[in-house]
Each structure stands twice: as structure tokens, then as C-alpha cells.
Image: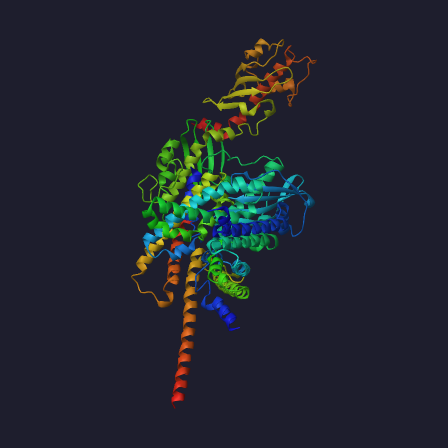
Amino acid sequence: MNKYKKITLDGLIFQNPTFMLVLGTCPTLGLINSAFSSMGMGLTVLVILTLSNVLISLLRKVIPNEVRIPCYIVIIATLVTFARMFLEKFLPDLYDSLGGFLALIVVNCIILGRAEAFANKHNVAEAAVDGISQGLGFTLALTVMGIICEFFGKGSLFGYAIMDFKIAMLATPAGAFLVYGISIAVFVYVVDGVQRMLRVKANKLARENMLKEAA
Amino acid sequence: MTAKEFFKSTSFKCIVALLSILLVCGIFLTIMHGLLEVTAEEKLARAINKIYGKNVTTEVSDIKNKELDLATIEEAYCVTSEGGNYLVKSTGKGGFAGTVTCWVVVEIKDNNVSGIGKVTIDSYVGETQMAEIKQSFLDSFSTGYKDGIYYTTDDGFKVSSSTKSSNAICNAVNGALQYVKTEKLGMETNDIFKDFAYTQFIDKKSTTFKLSKDGGITYNITANGYGYADKFEIEITVSKDKTISAYKVTKDGSSGGYETPENIVNGEKFIGKKLEDITAILGEGLEYPGDDLNTEINTGSSNSTYVCYAAAAFALANYDVALANIDMFENFEYVKFINKSKSKYVVNDDLSVTYTLNVNSYGYTDKFEIEITVSKDNTISDFKITKDGTTDPYETPANIANGKKFIGMKLEDITAVLGEGLEYPGDDKNTEINTGASNSTYVCYTAAAFALANYDNCVPAESEGGNANE
Amino acid sequence: MGTFIAIVLAAVLTNNFITAKTYGICPFLGVSKKTSSAAGMGIAVTLVMVLATLVTYPIYMYVMVPLKIEFLEIIFFIFIIASLVQMLEKIIQKVSPTLYGAMGIYLPLITTNCAVLGVTELVIGDMSAIIGTASMNIGWAVLYALFAGLGFTLVMIIMSGMREKLNYYKTPKALAGFPIAMVTACFICMAFMVFTYIV
């Protein structure tokens, strides 16, 4: 069980694709001016990533090593095409708000990256958990930044107007860069701080134990 | 490598694996495409559902991407279940580095546009300030509809922090209105400045032009503001030789501290100027040359001066178009007997009027071309047929063909024969008209009556008085 | 001529791939530490963008549309791009080892660059806002790809220049690396936003 907990924590925090690995930056920067579209993009990637992880993990024994990358790309492209059809049919609003970035999920480094780094070395259950946790990490990061950018940049949340005050620049690519950059800094700073605190605490505990034994 | 070895090799395995994955994926997607395809009708139904909030029946129009001046009409539908309203998908130009596509519901009543039902945004490209566009702005098109309206951001159809995007929406709505009016209802566009150059510098709604006494054109221009300069109202007369003969600023739009120079306000600077004189300074495109350059514009109130120069250029450049657009015979009597577009008149120095008339045909006669001069005392002093429209074997009588018959005639002499309405008296009556070529004679009489009846229209009373004083 | 200027202005300045569309951010952030490598990457991306458009546009318009298999465009395009990149790498290696040394190392990274797939997807879509009233054809498509690539290169070089200068200054530890690069990018974006007003 500990193994799954580690995979989950890695996906959400220690190897968070958005803040720690800085992958999938194009859709992030392009869509975080709206909380709705950034959350939609996050969830779409979550589904595609999980499915591709599962499929690639299933096929990892079948696919020859030499042509694995083209095979992964075909599988991912199929999933993205399917997602595009599905969204166009059933969620046209989301389809419109994602625009060109929907097709660009194919070249989203997170998906190919997880396929290459994780799914082809682990079993189906682990690959699925990894897909979900990485996808969730991506979704949460995007949604939080989307809320920040939309709230301050447009004065609204998920399309509902809240206030008149706004800093319009935050809803443009320039603002997206700024918010993304600062978010990474804050996230890394907090995670580092917490880790250091835990280490200090552990060291202190160990020292006390040593002292106790010595006594 | 033998064939057998090849089938066992890694390359073969790779090819098989890749191809089979491709095949499976292709088949899967083809099936899914069949199941999930969004048809064109479904897309339209979605768009319409968004606009009306319910399903309506439509008739598809045959147009596709029709280019208008300010907008592109992408699609248009006649909504049959809503009383024949039109639903137009229109892309407005002139946005914030992009375009805005709107669905516009144009309401129809008694074969005329009665209002804008609804405006919704379909999509936009390149606009970054669309978040500012609120529903209330879109509703203002419906509430602010007036007959013959032309929506502009100047009239308050704008959102302050995204003026350019609202401009694109205005253009989309205007385009939809124009399309429905001209293409669907067959109405003429009433933009008299359609063929004019440099219209971007003037306010089309409050600019007028008319024929001046000397045969030139007098414009009453409301020039758009530029930079620090507000709107100007300028009266410009362009004479026949396409130079400015009169120039007067009637409303100065310069702002305090930057007064328009005196020789521009009273027009001295412009008298006798040609279009080339202005384009020599501002270039063909009449671009603002900037404050740093040492040009004539740089007067200390460069913006105002620029506006005045642009107005002058507008007046000069459009002399020919304006002349073609002017109805010289507005309010004239008996115009039904002449072909307005091929007739003209000039006021001579002695205040007599010389008409060159193209007279409409009647019965057996073809078109006549007649030159008539009416002297100051309202009698005909000269009558000359330049093209005789009589057909064989009905020759126009000699005293009419050489005009002798008409010299000295007054209007009453003709109405005494033909009556006030100048009706054709018929061949059987024994009148002056009954010459053996009655139709031709009748036509010449109507031309003479036209010339005599409209002397006062050609030479307005006040100018007569003015000239008398000189 | 008007269309030509409109495309150039839009592709390089107003609709710049990085500053307005946020395509191709991975190399923008990853390979912009040195001006020489940024320029190499930019040129390589431009080359692949032009070649990819040259191949995908006719295939889409004259093969996929008549066969009604537009829905397979993503698979087709990514496959074409991947094969092109592979081929280009092999050709450059054979023909000019010097050139390969200068930009060959960037080529494998380009397959997963959204700028390339992005431009091929863009030119088959609705381009009316950029090319105005003229209808889209292979010439405009390739021209757009070329100048979009050059616009990308321009921003890459600007960014790398700024990052080289940034090396001389002390950065707070939390901001070191990606965060400070993104704040720098923010200013470049704001500078490019100004161009939106000229068209």
C-alpha cells in the first residue's frame, strides 16, 4: 500500500508535473486566464493520461523497444482524437473554450513523459494510480492558477462576475507567465520548507533517542 | 538475409507491431467518428438554441461569406416560425486587432426591418478585451434601434474599456442590417457617400453637399476629431476647376491653448488650393505627419490643422462623385418629362439660365435633346433642338425645330394650351399642338414649360438680390 | 501585397507564437539560457514548421478532405512531423556535419514541440482574421509558417539575451530557474502586447 501512497504523493506534490517538473506549459499558459477552461483542460488530460498509462502498461510486453515512441504517439493521438470527438458532441462549451490546445495535448510532454518514464516499467494498477495522481496534480495546479488569474484578471470566477476591480493584464499571456512563475516559486518554497522542517524534526527525534539510549 | 530470417527479425516485429496498433486505432476512431460526428445541422441547431432558447424552424439561405464594407455575412437564415425574421451570422471588422462574429436577429414587419431582436456573440478572433462586453451592451442594439440607424461607437454603442471590440460588434450588426435590407428586402442602401474617398475623416451623418450657384459644389462638412481636436464644422465650396473657392470653419473644434490659426478658420489658406497641394503635404493616404516634422500642418495646433486639411482634401477629391450624386432637379416642377441624369443647367452671368435637356419620349417621338435659355424676365430667349427625336413621316414643324416659335414665350402661354398638368390634349383637338407631328410638338412644349417653370429654382431669390446690389 | 504584410505582421508581432498564443513554451524556457543555442533551436523549429506545413497542408486539403477522414488529422500530422524530423536529422548529419553540430541536437526535441503541430493545425483552420479577405492556399500557409517560425526565433533570441544578462545578478533562491525565466517572459509578452495596437 505504501507504494501507491508514494506514487500519489509524487504525482500531487513531489513530482507535480506543473510546478516541479514544469511540463505541459503551453496549455497551462494559454488557458489559465479562465478557471473553467483550465479545469476542463486538467480533467481532459487526467482522463487521457490515465487511459494512455493503462494502455501502454498493458502493451509494454508487446511493443518492441525500437518502435515504442511512435507506438506511444499513435496511442496518445488516438485518445486525443477520441476526446476531441467526445467533447465536441457532449460538452461543446468546453470544446470551444479549449480551442487549439485540445489537439496539442498530443504533444503535451506530461503524457509522453509518463509513458516513457513510468507506464512502460510498471504494472497496470500502478500505472493507473500514477496517471490519476499526475493528472490530479496537473488539474489542481491549473485550477488554482486559473482561479487566481480569472479572479484578479477578469473579476469573475468560472464565468460568474464577482467584482468590478480587475487587473486586465493578468488575463493575458503576460499575466499567465507572471502567475505561473510566482506560483512555482511559492510552491517550491513551501514544499522545501515543509521537507526541511520534517527532516529537522526527524533528526531531533533521532538525537533524543540516541541520548535516551546513551542515558 | 533470407525471407525466413526477415520474418523472424526485430525489424519485422517492429513493423507488425506499429502497423497493427495503427490499424486498431484507425478502426476505433472511424467507428467513434460515425457515432459521435456533429453534423452541420446539429451545429446550427445548437447556435439557434442558444439564441432563441428553443428550437425554431429555419429556411437556409444560399449565401456563404458575403463581403460587405464593414462585415462579412457568413450565413443567413429566414426563421419561418418567428414571423419571417432573419437570423444573420455576421463577422464585424475593425476590432482590437481581430474580428467578432455575432448572430443577429433582424425582425421584419410589413416587409421592412422593424428592429433588432437579439445580438449574441458567436466567436471572436484576436480580441483580448471581450470579457468587458456585457449582455447589457448587446441588448442596447435592440433598445436603441431606430429606422435607418447606423450603429457607431460615437453614438454610445460602446463599452468604454474595449471600444474597438464594440466597434467590431457594431459593424457586425450594421452589416447584418445592410444585408437584410439590400439583399433580402431589395431596399437601396442610402449611404450617399458610398463611392466617396476619404470618408473616414468626416461624419457621414451630418455632412451634406449641394450644387453651388457657380456650378461648383458646396459641402457642409462635419469633420471627425483627431487627437486633441474635436469635431469641426466646415463649409467648403469647390468650384468647377476643382479648386477651393470658399472655405469657412463654422464650428471650431480646437481645444483651449491650441487655437486653430486665423488663416485657416477664415479659409484664406485654402482658397485656390488643389487636391495635389494637400496630398503633397499629407500624402495620398492623408496620414498625420507627426508633430516633429516641419510641415505646413505644424502650426502649434497641428491636430486641428490636420482635421481642416483632411476636410479640404475630402471636398476636393470627391468633386466628380458629388456632382454625379447631386440631384440637380430636386423640388423642380415637371421633372417627369425630362431625363434627370442626362440633363443639366447653368446660371449665366446675366442671371439667365441655360438648360441642356434630354426630354423623355412620347408616343411616336424618340428622345429630344434641347437647349433652352430662359432670361431674367422669365421668358424664353433661346430654344435650340440639338437632337430631333421625330420619326418618319412626322417631321417636327420648322418653326419649332429652329425654336422661333418659343422665343419670348412665358409659362402661361404654354399652360394656356396644355393646362396646368401639361396633359397631352389628344390628336383630335384643334390646338397648337396639332401640327401633324403632335407628339414631337408636345414634347418640345413640355420641355419649354419645364424650363420656364423652374427658373426660380435655378436662381434662388436671395442670390438675385445679392447680385443686384453689386 | 496587403495579405503578405498582414501575415508577416500577424505571425511575427501581433499573434506571435510565444507571446500571444503560448505555443512552443518548452524550448522557450528550456533552451534559452544561451543566445547561440536559442538561435539554433529557433532556426531548427522554423525549418521544421515550414517543411511540416508544406507536407501536411496539401495532404489535408487534397487527400483527407476528399476522403472525409479529417478526424484522423492529429494522427496523420504527428506522424508526418515525427518522420520529417527523423529524416531531416539523418539528411543534415550526412550532408553537413557542421550544421548538424550547430542544430542537430535540437531536432529530436522538436517532435513534441507544440509550435510545429500548432502551426499545421492553425493553417487548416479559420485564418480569416489574419489573411483578411483572401482565401487560404498553400502559399499563404507556408508563408505563415515561415514567419511564425521567425517570430518564434526572435522571441527566443530576446529571451536568451535577457537570461544571459540575468546571470550577472543575484536571484532569490526560490525564484532561481524557471520562476525568474517566466517573470522575464512576462515582460517580453507585455512588450509584444503593444504591437496589438498597430494593426
Classify B323 as above or below A67: above
Image location of residue A16, percent across then percent down: 46, 65
Q: Nearer the viewer, residue B288 or C79?
A: C79
Q: Residue at x 50, y 28 (%)?
A: B324
* The C terminus of chain A: image quadrant: bottom left
Q: Residue at x 54, y 23 (%)?
A: B342
Where residue A103 appears, as percent x and y from the top left, is 51, 52
Residues A26 and B119: in front is A26
Q: Please state which of residues B331 and B31 is positioned toward the viewer in this rendering.
A: B31
User: Going by the image, does B465 lie left or right of B453?
Assistant: left
Can you see residue B57? yes
Percent across and percent down for residue B28 are 59, 51
Q: Nearer the viewer, residue B180 or B309?
A: B180
Count the numbered circles shown: 0
Q: Quadrant of residue B467?
A: top left
Residue B373 located left or right of residue B228: right
Q: Is residue B192 above or below residue A63?
A: above
Q: Residue furthest left?
A: C168
User: Relative to B48, does residue B242 appear above or below in the rendering?
Assistant: above
Asked whether, in this view, residue B104 is left or right of residue B315, the answer is right
Instruction: Please state the horizontal and vertical placement of residue C157, each as a whole percent of the image.
Output: 35, 52
Q: How is the image coloured?
A: rainbow
Residue B128 visible from this viewpoint: no
